[in-house]
Image (tube, rainbow, N blue to C red):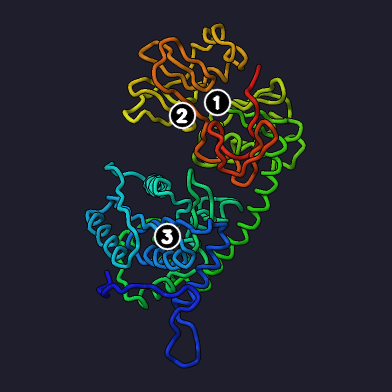
Amino acid sequence: MRGVPPARLRLPYRHACRCARGDGARTVTERLLTAFAEALEACGPFEPRPALAVGVSGGPDSLALAQLADTWAAARGGRVLALVLDHGVRPAAATEAALAASWLAARGIAVRRLALPPAGPRPAETLRAERLAVLADAAAEAGCLHLLLAHHRGDQAETVLVRALRGSHAAGLAAMAPSRAAGRVRLVRPLLGLGAGALRDVLRAAGQPWIEDPSNAAGSVRARLRAALADQTGEGVGVRALAGVALAAAVARAAAAELRDRLLAEAVVLLPQGCARIDAGRLAAAADTAAAAALAAVLRAVGGHAQPVRAARVVGLLARLRAGRAGSAAGCLLRPGRGGWLVCREPAAVAAAATVPSDGRLCWDGRWQVEAPAGLTVGPVGAAAAALARADRQARGLPRVVLATLPALRDGATLVAVPAIGYHSARTGGAMRAAFRPPQPVSASAMLRVPGGSALAPGGAIPSCSHGARLGAPLRG
């Protein structure tokens, strides 16, 4: 840890103090503020008075990000909330989180301290996902639409190498996106074009100490790659070249995503019963890459997967669709039906029953947000589908395989409700709802068409469907 006393960073956005050389040259901090503003605005749009949440660890990158973001937001009448997370991985984590929070508070930056729930050792990827989920939830609860993370050019270079070692194709080599949707917030990484050395220079100019995480020097794959690059500032030719690879791959990925989104809008209708209808003719006629990407996006949403579906699992299913044959992949079934092909959850893959907790809210099967009285259980309709179809008109109109995978509320062995189709027994008590909300949208850029001809941008207030593709009328037969 550097023992430099903290000092407040309050530089006017476009008029940071000049160097005292008399030649009008700008300071490192002013140059970084300009570069930061350009990068952040390229990730826009932002509301008139932007509310930004920043994930902070106490390391130099996240502390610099918090200060840059605070200056940028203040110039626009906005605000910044620093989310300081105690990950609990090392004994000193709580002390470091408290120290980072005190530094930020001394600079007038609002702070909220967070902690991961206690758990045993877990893989690095699991830990990263848990950290991100906690930060995203806290940002949304605080009314911040944007969650800023401090990954920089060196991190991007390492990510390219890690994915190359794993055999990733062009889309994977694009590495981290500057901006992407993450549930109720948008992840923004405005430092990807900046080197780590420049961020440390900002802190030195402000007299701001920081914490060095010893795990960054441990024997992980990333740590070994970082040592091989031997570039702590992020200004070397190797890091710059790898960042250039990521940028070129990102351009290619964006072009492919545009083709995928156009095909999704033309050929796919998402349904509030947690399934999708596909115009097989349009999908089969599309280029292989676009068709596979569109089908993978549908499988990801219908299957409730947080991570993308691997291409190898999609290629065979696409071939079966083009040959007019049913198939399955990624926990989903693909079969011909009235009005197009049906993609639905595979009954054998749905989650087991779970008890509604005390707050009355539960995410079931990775894709259904359920609200019900505590103590009831949520599980698939399952074998009760036949009896339910005989007793309820809406259930009767659904394909049996779709009905069997809908979330059902039970009191012991008694079926109480299937909220997704509006079925409630006479014993129903309390509010019960189930909304189809996959962890990731089918498409972050496609518009959402709803009955009646209106349209909503991604994230519109349609409670029963993820954004992307179209939202169709209730499924029949």
Q: In this view, does 458 lie to the left or right of 80?
A: right
Identify whether 273 is placed above or below 166.
above
**Residue that appears at 46% across and 33% down:** 366
**Residue that appears at 63% across and 53% down:** 253
Disc 3 to disc 1: CB gap under 8 Å:
no
The location of residue 363, given as percent across then percent down, is: 43, 31
Quote the CA–CA distance across marks 1 and 2.
10 Å
Q: Mark 1 points at which residue?
A: 345
Quadrant placement of the N terminus: bottom left
Quote the CA–CA distance across marks 2 and 3.
36 Å
Q: Mark 3 points at which residue?
A: 79
**Residue that appears at 52% across and 48% down:** 181
The location of residue 468, given as percent across then percent down, is: 61, 40
Amino acid found under the numbered disc labelled 2: Asp
Q: Which of 341 and 165 is in front in this view?
A: 341
Amino acid found under the numbered disc labelled 1: Arg
Q: Name the residue under label 2.
A: 365
